[in-house]
Image (spheres, rainbow, N blue to C red):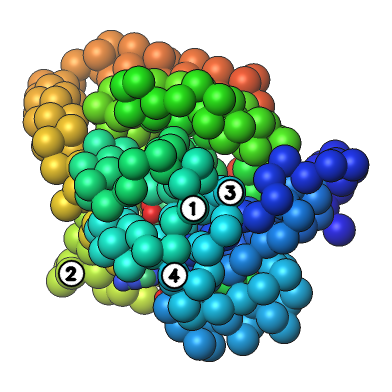
Amino acid sequence: MPERLGPPLDMPLFDRVALIGLGLIGSSIARAVKHLNLAGTLVAVDRSEEVVTRVRELAIADEATTDFVAGVRDADLVILCVPVGVCGTVAEAMKPGLKPGSIVSDVGSVKASVIAQVQPHLPDGVHFVPAHPVAGTEHSGPDAGFATLFHNRWCILTPPEGEDEEAVERVRAFWTAMGSNVEIMAAQHHDLVLAITSHVPHLIAYNIVGTAADLETVTQGEVIKFSAGGFRDFTRIAASDPTMWRDIFLHNKEAVLEMLGRLNEDIALLARAIRWGEGDKLFDLFTRTRAIRRGIISSGQETAEPDFGRRKDQA
Ligand code: NAP
């Protein structure tokens, strides 16, 4: 039983909620919704029969189906929890089942592209409130989720201009109930912010782990043996789902390239400082970055515990 979630609500926030894609994020939402009584009925929709069976075994939804149209029928809130590259296809597939007045949302890590993909498929009278919970782990699938994943984490809503305010507030209330802090911003701005706070750091991790794997002068055995020197922390990030991250880079191309350009310039400056023995420059940077880390800890977004306080099963 999650310790940090509040008690169940007396009255659900929505009569019927459908989640499409019961992976890490979808199954975490399912667990939180069930625990907190946020939906009168919770429907799990997944393309895979195997996942639907697993959802039934775990009892994390009231109904489970592979039929997208039947799954979203009569739902007041539908949340797409699939990789950003397939949001348009999934929206098209579920479209015939959408109820007028319902709210469609998503959890994609990129927002402008998801809006461009999904919006054309939504019938008039269906509201669209895209969301991105800035919370996750490197694990995937319905067994990886946990109800407290969003607790004390930010969830960014990027409603298209002119979207119904009541729909936005209902989605805000949904995430707030799961323990998230909610912020609203424009999709383009979201994509730029996340490029530097999430996407580029993942690219660096994928790159450094890939480089180490390809080295000829240092054996892979040595890389693993001495990984506690820093490399290990990159490998956790670089173990994240390949489909999800391929889609993120392809769908947030401009913002990632913009931030990478900036990063390349800064790395060139660091290389220069090392080459010319400019210790003060290195020391000043490392002092500034240490302060950023302390700021993240004091804002409650990380812990100073050993191993970053990760759950033991995520080590
Ligand atoms: P996940 O555990 O890999 O689950 C992905 C889900 O999408 C699975 O249910 C999968 O179905 C389904 N799916 C994949 N391809 C599909 C397709 N072509 N058609 C229909 N369904 C498809 O991934 P996740 O971590 O939950 O990520 C889901 C979304 O959350 C992504 O958009 C990601 O950007 C966003 N997000 C992730 C994190 C994170 O840290 N993981 C954090 C915030 C937001 P099957 O089970 O049949 O494969």
Position of residue 156 measured from the top left corner of the image (x, y, whole percent):
47, 30
Image quarter of the N terminus: bottom right
Tag 1 residue = 99
Q: Give residue 113's position: percent from left, percent from top.
A: 22, 43
CA gap between label 2 and label 3 equals 50 Å
Is mark 3 in CB contact (under 8 Å) with mark 1?
A: yes
SS for callout 3: loop
**Which callout, 2 or 1, points at the residue further toward the start of the chain?**
1
Q: Which residue is mark 3?
A: 76
The quadrant where residue 27 appears: bottom right
Q: Amino acid at mark 2?
A: Asp
The quarter of the picture where residue 269 lies is: top left
Pick whichever of labels 2 and 3 is earlier in the sequence. 3
- x then y, percent, for residue 309: 67, 46
Dot 4: few (<14), some (14–19), or many (≥20) neighbours within 10 Å? some
How far, Cα to Cα, is label 2 from label 1? 52 Å
Closer to the chain start, of discs 3 and 1, is 3
Q: Nearer the viewer, mark 3 or mark 1?
A: 1
Secondary structure beneath dot 1 equals loop
Drawn side of residue 30 relative to residue 168, left or right: right
Relative depth, front residue between 279 and 57: 57
Determine which of the numbered discs, if any, sits on residue 214 in the image: 2
